[in-house]
Amino acid sequence: MLEFAILGLLQQSPMHGYELRKELAAVLGGRRSISYGSLYPALKRLAGAGLIASDEPTPRALLPADAPALTGRRGKVVYTITAEGKERFAELVSEAGPEAYDDEGRFGVHLAFFRHTAADVRLRILEGRRRTVERQRDRLLESLRRTQARLDRYTLELQRHGLDSVDREVRWLTELIDSEKDDARAEAARARPPGTAPPSTT
Amino acid sequence: MLEFAILGLLQQSPMHGYELRKELAAVLGGRRSISYGSLYPALKRLAGAGLIASDEPTPRALLPADAPALTGRRGKVVYTITAEGKERFAELVSEAGPEAYDDEGRFGVHLAFFRHTAADVRLRILEGRRRTVERQRDRLLESLRRTQARLDRYTLELQRHGLDSVDREVRWLTELIDSEKDDARAEAARARPPGTAPPSTT
DNA sequence: GTGCGGATGTATCGTCCCGATACATCGAGC
DNA sequence: GCTCGATGTATCGGGACGATACATCCGCAC
């Protein structure tokens, strides 16, 4: 997931770790952020796989003679996506199976890069996510139905809030899906000569 | 966090792993569940620390003579909380610092066992959680304000939904806090002789 | 009556992720 | 002149997760 997000961000422009972390936090929706303990190993893995290149500039070049021996003096490391990295990103961006929507974080990353995703894949991911969240809601409802009586106020309140948030997510996804379908219809109408019958909405 | 939840559940009654996992999922709000890859190591840690005892019954006792050699035949393992475990749980339940509310999961567990928590600690945890979530909201708003222009529809939509969910959580917490304060007032009124002046609401 | 799927049940392994921590620089404000 | 917070790179230990393996029992369909 992290790898995916990193490739997506580096696709836009080269960055170093610090920027990457901030952009990542924005992409992830702001609620949960990524730690350096995840970021740097991920960058290493990506570099090892040849998907990104680390550009380590000014390793203390053109120094005055009184340079402090060899203190750490780490230079900024700029990461750039490679051609293989772009290929890999294209692959990841067009995956439409459960791995694209079952995990919340992963789904968020897909959504963040939807502008690089084909329209039909977008729709499948959104609908898949909706199914996943609906199943969560059903499980929650079921569990609430069975245990409601012997729950105290706080647990009940927690479940209620969870249920509410799931409901809202389903509604949100439905709006997105509807708007996607509208776009698709408009697109089809644009490509079709006027007066022709529109295809049925399956 | 897991340890905390396990102790809380075993406080109510002894269980084996499978039950524990299901109850855990309910406690966690139903959205994210715990895997065995987390559960069993946690149980081992707790047993190692003497906070729970594993009761491994019927290790193939009273078998007919034609018992199948020594096939695996694992017996059910029932876990029981020990006296030290109860002490530890009491400690955990009364912690009111950031560790109680900064992490969502941890906060959820605290809430789930609020009936074992003193009223003043409850209030401090709820208010701490609200501050944490409000800070998340502020960061999100700030980031939205700065980047709004150059964001595409999907990213924007994701942020909007995130913001909405944060807002809802703040409102929910406020309701809980108000209701806690009402309870506290009622309690104080009950303990106070009629006609005495109520304490000021700080 | 038999077989098959799904719930119950215990457990491990590799991989990834996180929090804490260390180190280093630089601009702003006190 | 000094401290505080942002910028910046990096590691380490511990913990969580997904995948996987294995075993039992029950009900339902064929």
Image: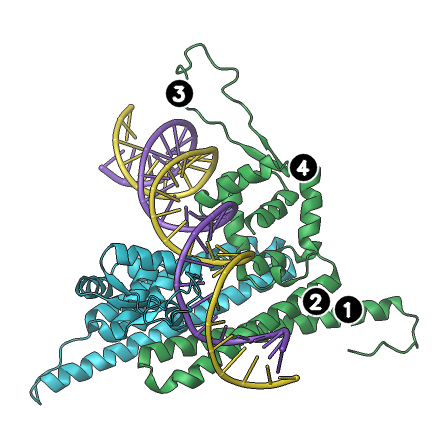
Chain colours: A cyan, B green, C yellow, D purple
Mark number, residue B71: 3
- Given the image, what chain letter belongs to the residue carrying mark 4? B
- For disc 3, the neighbor class at 10 Å (few under 14, some 14 to 19, many from 20) is few
Q: Which three-letter amino acid code belongs to the residue tagged 1?
A: Ala
Q: Which three-letter amino acid code belongs to the residue tagged 3?
A: Thr
Q: Which residue is mark 2?
A: B123
Q: Is residue A126 visible?
A: no
Q: Which three-letter amino acid code belongs to the residue tagged 4?
A: Thr
At x 36%, y 71%, the residue is: A63
State the image quarter where residue B160 is shown: bottom left
Residue A140 x/y as whole percent: 47, 58
- Given the image, what chain letter belongs to the residue carrying mark 1? B
Mark 3–mark 2 CB contact (< 8 Å): no
Mark 1–mark 2 CB contact (< 8 Å): yes
Q: Earlier in the sequence, mark 1 or mark 3?
A: 3
Q: Earlier in the sequence, mark 3 or mark 4?
A: 3
- For disc 2, the neighbor class at 10 Å (few under 14, some 14 to 19, many from 20) is some
